[in-house]
Image: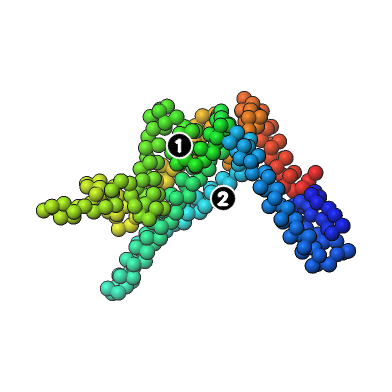
């Protein structure tokens, strides 16, 4: 698709992006000057478009690129790697083991456990990023009003506000339980690992008390703190967190509306937030046959555009 053409050359949108092609009638130096002038023009156009872009963003006339695949691959990569490390059994020593050999065996085991802990921490971090991305992309399917700046406000909010926009945490006991468990994982592991090792409130502090000496700010709750353990995330804790994440994924798609929304997000098709597009999503969700036809059509158009097959 040609977007600019002159005696100097042609700029066209092709399968792998924007390409500029110089005409043989001008020199490379002249072509470089022409490109610099076009770049200056782009900067001018951007300044003129900024107010329009701001209005579009505030009124919800926007789309979001679907990056679910990238987040999901990272999440499952770290999870599988952590599973592998935690699954390393304690190696047996030789028939005639020495103290040195025993130290090596224990060292190898603890190294594997430590690696599993690091990988589990990375898994937790990307799961919450993945969860934020998923919940925002599900919104147009669930009647969310993206106008009046609500979408921008939600994108800037914390993970739990995005989560509550999709799930009513007062709806049932299971929704409340999963939300509370996620908060614990967030406060005990994700936040400290992502924010300098500092836990909620004064949990990271050690308090000087007269005649008592130094005590942890978390008091007896230090047993729940990551500071209490030799490994930040032990094998058993990793397994519990994985089970929780599985339950959260399943619960997100537990109703027909959310199931359709998740299916679309997992398709990695981009998501429109404007009212006409949201209405098309919701109309397609009226039946499984309508939805399958809609998703197939969307996928076809996406592939056609990606392959420049017009």
Colour approach in the figure: rainbow
Label 2 to label 1: alpha-carbon separation: 23 Å
Label 1 secondary element: helix
The reply to whether residue 161 is visible in this rendering is yes
Q: Residues within 10 Å of mark 1 (few under 14, many from 20)?
A: some
Tell me the residue that label 1 is attached to: 161
In what element is the residue under mark 2? helix
Residue in view at x 70 percent, y 42 percent: 302
Q: Which sits in the foreground, 261 or 242?
A: 261
Which of the 4 image quadrants contains residue 284?
top right
Query: Tag on residue 70?
Result: 2
Q: Residues within 10 Å of mark 2 (few under 14, many from 20)?
A: few
Q: Could you tell me residue 32's position as x and y percent?
A: 77, 64
Residue 135, x across and y down, in percent:
51, 38
Q: Quadrant of residue 27?
A: bottom right
Front position in the image: 75 or 67: 67
Question: Residue shown at 11%/53% (left/top)?
Answer: 211
């Amino acid at each position: 698709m040609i977007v600019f053409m002159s005696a100097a050359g042609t700029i066209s949108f092709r399968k792998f992006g924007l390409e500029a092609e110089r005409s043989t009638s001008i020199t490379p130096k002249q072509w470089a000057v022409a490109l610099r002038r076009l770049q200056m023009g782009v900067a001018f156009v951007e300044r003129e478009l900024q107010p329009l872009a701001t209005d579009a963003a505030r009124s919800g006339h926007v789309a979001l690129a679907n990056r679910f695949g990238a987040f999901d691959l990272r999440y499952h990569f770290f999870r599988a790697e952590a599973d592998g490390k935690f699954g390393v059994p304690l190696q047996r020593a030789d028939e005639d083991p020495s103290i040195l050999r025993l130290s090596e065996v224990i060292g190898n085991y603890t190294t594997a456990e430590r690696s599993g802990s690091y990988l589990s921490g990375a898994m937790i971090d990307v799961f919450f990023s993945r969860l934020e991305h998923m919940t925002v992309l599900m919104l147009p399917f669930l009647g969310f009003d993206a106008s009046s700046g609500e979408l921008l406000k939600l994108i800037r909010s914390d993970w739990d506000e995005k989560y509550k926009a999709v799930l009513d945490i007062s709806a049932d006991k299971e929704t409340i339980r999963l939300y509370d468990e996620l908060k614990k994982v967030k406060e005990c592991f994700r936040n400290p690992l992502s924010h300098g090792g500092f836990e909620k409130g004064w949990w990271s502090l050690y308090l000087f008390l007269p005649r008592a000496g130094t005590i942890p700010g978390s008091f007896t709750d230090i047993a729940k703190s990551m500071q209490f353990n030799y490994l930040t995330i032990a094998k058993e804790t990793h397994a519990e967190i994985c089970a929780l994440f599985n339950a959260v994924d399943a619960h997100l798609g537990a109703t027909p509306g959310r199931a359709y929304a998740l299916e679309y997000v997992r398709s990695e098709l981009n998501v429109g937030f404007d009212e006409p597009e949201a209405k098309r999503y919701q109309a397609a969700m009226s039946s499984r046959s309508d939805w399958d036809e809609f998703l197939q059509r969307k996928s076809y158009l996406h592939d056609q555009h990606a392959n420049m097959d017009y």
